Amino acid sequence: MSMIVDAFVSKLLDGLASVKDEVARVLGVADEIARLQETLQTIKAVLADAERKKIQSEAINNWLKKLKDVMYDADDILDECRFEAEKSKVATSSRPQPSSYFSVGMSVFKKMRFTHQIDRRIHELNQRLENILAEKSKFDLQLFSAGRDDHQSTSKVSRMTSSIPEPDIVGSNVEQDTGKVVELLIKEDTRENILIYAIVGVGGIGKTTLARRIFNDERITANFPMKLWVCVSKDFEETSLLKDIITWAGGSPGGASSRAQLEPMVGEAVTNKKFLLVLDDSWDQNVWNDLLRNPLQSGATGSRILVTTRNEGVALQMKAVESHQVKLLSAEDGWVLLRKVVVLSGQEREIEDLKDIGEKIVDKCGRLPLAIKTVGGVLSRKSRNKKDWEMVLKTLSNNAWSSLTDFPKEVQPALYLSYEDLPSHLKQCFLYCSMFPEDYTFYRRDLIRYWISEGFIHEEGDLTLEELGEDCYGDLVQRSFLQPVPWPDDDEHSKCTVHDLLWSLARFLAGDENFFVKDGFEAVNSSSSVKRRRLWGRAKKEQRQEFIDALEGHNSLRTLVLRLEGSQVEENDVHNLIKKTPRLRVLHFLSSNIIKLPGSLGNLIHLRHLDLRSSQISELPESIENLVNLQFLILQSCGSLRNLPKGIGKLHNLRCLDLFATELEGIPIEIANLHRLNTLIHFVIRNNNSSSGCCTLEELKSLQKLKVLRIRQLERALNEGAVTGVNALRDMLQLEVLHLDWKGCSLRLHKSDHYSEEETKRIEEIFEVTLHPPPCLESLEINFYFGLRFPSWIASSSMDSLRRLKLSFCDKCPQLPPLGKLPNLDYLKISWATAVKKIGTEFLGQGPDSSRDQGGRIQISFPKLTTLIFEYLHNWEEWEWEVKDDDRPIVLPNLKVLKLMDCPKLRSLPSGLVHHATTLTELEIVGACAIKKIGTEFLGQEPDCSRDQGGRIQISFPKLTKLIFAGMFNWEEWEWEVKHDDRLIALPNLKQLTLCHCPKLRSLPSGLVHHATSLTKLEISSCDNLREIRGLSSIKELEISYSRNLEGVSDLPSLKTLALGDDKMQSIPEWLHDFPALNKLEITAGTQLLRRCLKNGLDWTKIEHIPNVYAKNFNRSRYISKSPSAFSTSLNDNVEDEYGHTRFSIRN
């Protein structure tokens, strides 16, 4: 069962305690509520023991099922009591007019009737509970008092590090196995056009991990121009799988929805392409034999299928030419993995004396990586002593549950032990995932909101529900119950999945309470006696009505996540659905084309989460005001929505209102009543033509709980007359994220020049006064500001908490604010500041003649900044930042990344950069067209001096690892010569150098050869004036493209990989020889050059000695692949142009 009764009873008791007095006063049911509380307290004492024993005792399990049903009913009744109490409070707060006495009398009558009904229902509920309580004596259940381990919250550390990376892959055979399978896949074999290889092993052994390493191997990338990956799973859906392949191949399925439509699209996507397709987690040979075999035959010869499966019979029936069996971890490798999960790197010695017990635990885990990681999650929360570890070992040895006939055979006892170790609230959160299909990808934010809406997370201390949800998410990730999906630099959109073994365990434990329907409606009509509580479903257009009809009798559903496919979803369809699901807490329409919502939406009084994103609704029904329990209202991308009803102000429990990508005329002033709102995305000021019932900026001041606020269309504030002096944000003492935008945030829509002088002054006042943020702000983004100066607060002490700042299209401000004063700023990005011509020391927050503050302390500018980005500053000419004396301030002591993007008039880099930014690891300069020469000043070296005033040898950019110069169209000279032995040390850790679109650069400096001894990768592109590359002894990877006057490349003894690219390349360069370590050559060129690389071609002798060669044309339709054991090509006898287009055929 998905409900963990222990956690649910705790939630009910908390709910009763919070509303008992008010509900009892308004509805007069005090005695029955007190009786309910007392019974729940008595039952709660034995629930933890009952939860542990239920899997081995059918009688206890049935007892808990009966109790669970009562708990769900109790939760519904408590919600109804809150609802009626809220209505009564609103009714009594307004004085009745004489003409409304009759209606008031009717309201009193209705209240009396409801009170009688609710009293009777609570009485019946109490009777049922007492009957259930009487049965507990049969089971010898032990009293249990929840300790700290079952507490909901964890430390703030887990919130800050919720996306814990998986421990490093271990196992002495991993590299060997990867190499073996890679060689099988790339070797020449002409038995079939497409060959199948398989990776076979039990669940949790690491098949997918091995397949992923193979998929990402550079040899695979070199040999297969197209790589595809789809997860098949046990109950795969044919059309979804075909769509995934089309998408991976770079296409789009569009509106195609049938197999007949999609199969030709798959064939077209792979035509003449040499591809590798991974079919991960395959359970059925028909995925190949009946579905994919025919459409994939259009692929080029040499294409391969790699299947991962638990069943070798599946591989055999797919006619796999070879299967690789994944072996169990050795005892030593298993211990290494366990140790990595339990302790942090560098702390391994702390548990070395527990190795003997650890290796026994590894054996009990079957030496399976997944089981070891989950048990490691248990041990990481235990004391590091033998007693606690032996207790875990004992529990693993006593795996009585695995003998149950219906327990999933593939699930290791270690996984169940790890589940049992979860606190009850985490168990509920984990089991909730079982309502989604296998291998489903969750957005972290959505999942947390679902948990909150279902009541799995409740308030505790000073932490918000969202913070507690982040704790739960991070805890489940650390324990390996959730697996993060990599999502670069965007924590807001991070995702996760559940391993299929853990999903099987969750499905078993949740039973029929949670279910999903991928296609059709038959599963909805299941004969199960268990009441359905949660459903994820997808219904095609032709099945929509049957699906909705099948919901009849499922009025106990609490979560419904539903995609209604096809054309417009009519109002009546939604009405019928709502009528059948009155107890919903979560209603999420997944990109369903809903055109209108019915008034019956207001009947869903239990609803907490309503997600209508990407629907076509133009309005919300007035009845939405009845949804007083609603916490999350998601209206993202509802592009036809123009207004919100005034009744939205009655949603007093609303926590998030997301209006991203909507085009509202305004927001009702009643939003000021939403005192629990903590996230407001795309607040819009009223339009000049709107009624006075819409918000101005000042209406924001009552929303004091906001943590995230994004305001757009700020130009409308100009219509409001004189600035009143009211700070709308002052009392938002929890505000962390603030975005301030103008209409559309689009360059095409923004014309700052058309604002008058008066309007410019007024917007400056609005920013200075009305939009002055509170001191708790951590992230600020301003887009399309058209004032002439930035507000004074932006670099004041009131912004000391600020960590991230983005300023974009502030194109009328000629001077940047003194942002160096901000003590905690970590990330700064300034874009499209086209009025800026000079950035001086004022930007650093320093006075022109002072390097010390008033207390005599040396100033530190940007003390915590790690990333600084300037982009599209088209008129920026000078960066003034000179080094004058030893008593200078400290500047950018922690800077790691500096990017100067498309600043075409910038003449030079400041000397202060190299002297101060000593921690810089990445420097990127793009589009600095005014720079003609980079001299020794770039390295901070005076012309005749290589030592500082203290006699120490200078080290320039000591930590820089990546240096990029691109779009430097007038750069001619890089002056950096070696003159004497007592020279400076420069770029000692540089690993990657990229020179792109520097057409006038004549040569690489000799200093680069002598100093950059750690340089391993060099990229040269469109450097037409460059003549030679030589003497770089540490280079391992070299990429050269469109540098057509390059005459010589030599003296590169470490070179292992060489890539050449140019559609005009006529032949392989003559200098391609005498690279003793060269192992791989990649070529991207015209088809005619590829023909020269065939075995009988004119350039074959130039490449014959290189072990691995991969050449392709620009659209990847033609290729040559050469390895020590294989040679293959897709070239035919037709004469083609450089893009593979046939011009004529050669005939005998």
Image (tube, rainbow, N blue to C red):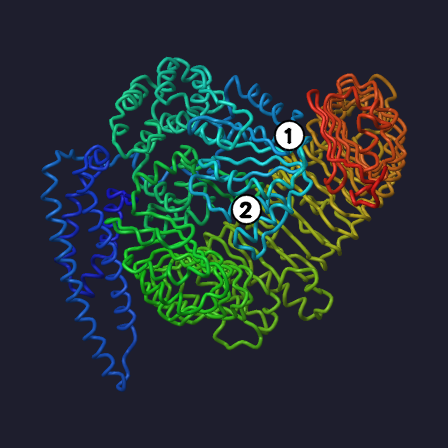
Question: Residue 850 location in percent, x, y?
Answer: 71, 41
Question: Secondary structure beneath disc 1?
Answer: helix
Q: Residue furthest front?
A: 1148
Q: Is residue 3 above or below residue 257?
A: above
Q: Is residue 705 visible?
A: no
Q: Amino acid at mark 1?
A: Ile
Q: Is residue 404 above or below residue 527?
A: above
Q: Would you call the spot at circle 1 few (<14 residues within 10 Å), some (14-19), or many (20 or more)?
A: some
Marked residue nearer the N-terminal end (2 or 1): 1
Q: Is residue 999 above or below residue 757?
A: above
Q: Residue furthest bottom?
A: 99
Q: Name the residue rendered at 38%, 49% in the picture.
A: 516
Q: Quadrant of residue 753?
A: bottom right
Q: Is residue 889 visible?
A: yes
Along the line of sight, which residue is nearer the eye, 530 or 627?
A: 530
Is 234 on the left or on the right of 921, as rendered?
A: left
Location of mark 1 (residue): 220
Q: CA distance from mark 2 to mark 1?
A: 23 Å
Is 489 on the left or on the right of 1055, as rendered?
A: left
Location of mark 2 (residue): 242
Question: Residue 186 location in percent, x, y?
Answer: 65, 27
Q: Amino acid at mark 2?
A: Leu
